[in-house]
Image: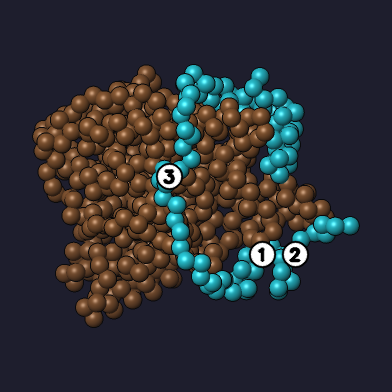
Chain colours: A cyan, B brown
Amino acid sequence: MKITKDQVSHVADLARLTINEQEQELFTKQLNDILMYMDMLNSVDTTNVEPMTHAMEGTEAFREDVVRSSLPLDAVLANAPDDDGASFKVPKIIE
Amino acid sequence: MESHYLTVHELEELLRAGETTSLEITEAMFRRIDAVEERVHSYINLMKERALEAAEASDRRRRDDAALGPLDGVPIALKDLLCTTGTPTTCGSRFLERFVPPYDATAVAKLRAAGAVILGKTNMDEFAMGSSTETSYFGVTRNPWDLERVPGGSSGGSASAVAAGECAASLGSDTGGSIRQPAAFCGIVGLKPTYGRVSRYGLVAFASSLDQIGPLARDVEDCAILLSVIAGHDERDSTSFPAPVPDYRDCVGRSIKGWTVGIPREYFIEGIDPAVTAAVDRAVSVMKDLGAECREISLPHTRYGIAAYYVIAPAEASSNLARYDGIRYGFRSPGERELLDLYRNTRAAAFGSEVKRRIMIGTYALSSGYYEAYYKKASQIRTLMKRDFDKAFASCDVILAPTTPTPPFKLGEKTDDPLQMYLSDVFAAPANLAGIPGISLPCGFTADGLPLGVQLLAGYFEEGKLIQAAAALEKALFTEQRRPAL
């Protein structure tokens, strides 16, 4: 086993996903299959090989730090699930 | 007039000659959509009213002798992860079912500025995660060549819309094959540009170091026309590259005599369908007839591509998709009293199972204790794959290989086995990992009449070479005009 049911629960928690028991079973099986397949990566010698995180490395882009207008408030709030006209509304965070 | 199967450049000629109008073409396109959409389901949302207005505006420009270029008045479809003001951009997800972006993606703004008529938003795998368009919240898209088969994915709707005559051309996105694989499955041409060639601003992110927008069209010349319009540096995407944009259309019709074409032996593996091998072999012999030297090469790390891709892409996705928290836009689970419950239950209710699976893989691969074994290791292998390509392009102009190991598969055939689904991108994902451009073009049919594709790959920013070779191959391969029996 590469990953246990408990680990799957833990990963779901880290990813902020509620999963039911059926999904937990299914994901445990599927993630095991997938992670076993990925084991082939370990057969490659990568000693002293730099990891590649980007196709165009070494092309960091700089620009002038100019203040520009942002989107108008009503455009920003137009897609909000809940708002009070000036802010996004969320459940109470601090008791 | 039956205009729905005309190419962009054919439409351009007719418009310029005054033989038709954009309004006529656009209305005919919507009639075609009405006739076939129930069977194919290429679109999630249509933009009919705005499209007809854009067509009329184009016709006015034409009358005033102020046409904007080859795309002016031409009907185009957009994959539904390109932001469009005034029309939802759903990403094939329940989460964004009602999300209407406050801005246009740069690629979309460039199309509009070139006078293109945007018809609507095409179906796709949810958040572009899939190879069959079966993970869309809005239902499956069917392959116009065989309605029991998938159109490929994740840009399946963009490919089927072109193949079924529901648009002249379309835009898609390619993270691990999502333009080239559906193009191959639907018998059309699809081009993934070099990473950084096209701005990703307003492209909903899946895996940011791999995603790239590109065209799907009926022929190579149309892809060239579209690419010239959408390519270029954009200050709102710092990964877009400030290289000049040539008129790629100039590369169409040029000889490839004396070119060297690399045939990577690792792309002819066990399990590849004999029909695919036969069609690709034919493409190789056509290249030889065109005066190119075809030489066997080795890309030794090819077989690790899918494993590396399915670490890196989900890792980036798990981070990118953290933004879907139910606070600022999109779906929110109703009646939640605790913030954590709101996050968890919102994401559980609004993401489909493939998206959840990839978030889980990515979160696991980045989590404490596993990062080195998975993410770092995969990123090192990515370096080795890039080196393989660098070495190959030191002696080859282009590489020729199959786009997919099989013809289009049946609906439902791979939905229960994610790993088998992933492996359908085995020949496509390496180009994304390296960041190089690739194009898939039709190269024949199976005995049952299913389309097959061949792909060409080139070095960084060598889209011109890619188009030159693909156009030459397309012309020499072409034998008979076939259309899906819709």
Figure quadrant of the N terminus of chain B: bottom left
Tag of residue A57:
3
In this rendering, the answer to whether B18 lies above or below A47 is below
Asked where in the image residue B289 lies, by quadrant, the reply is top left
> Amino acid type of disc 3?
Glu
Q: Chain of mark 1?
A: A
Q: Between disc 1 and disc 2, whose residue precedes?
A: 1
In front: A27, or B27? Answer: A27
Q: Nearer the viewer, mark 3 or mark 1?
A: 3
Residue at the image point whose x is 22% and y is 33% from the top: B396
Q: Does residue B176 appear left or right of residue B460 in this picture?
A: right
Percent of width and height locating residue B412: 51, 34
**What kind of element bears circle 2?**
loop
Q: Verify CB contact (< 8 Å) between mark 1 and mark 2.
A: yes
User: What separation in Å lies between label 2 and label 3 (alpha carbons)?
Assistant: 40 Å
**What kind of element bears circle 1?**
loop
Instruction: Give a yes or no on whether discs 3 and 1 share a subunit.
Output: yes
Tag of residue B254:
none
In this rendering, the answer to whether B387 lies above or below A1 is below
Q: Which residue is mark 1?
A: A80
> Amino acid type of disc 2?
Lys
Q: Which residue is mark 2?
A: A89
Residue at the image point whose x is 15% and y is 30% from the top: B293
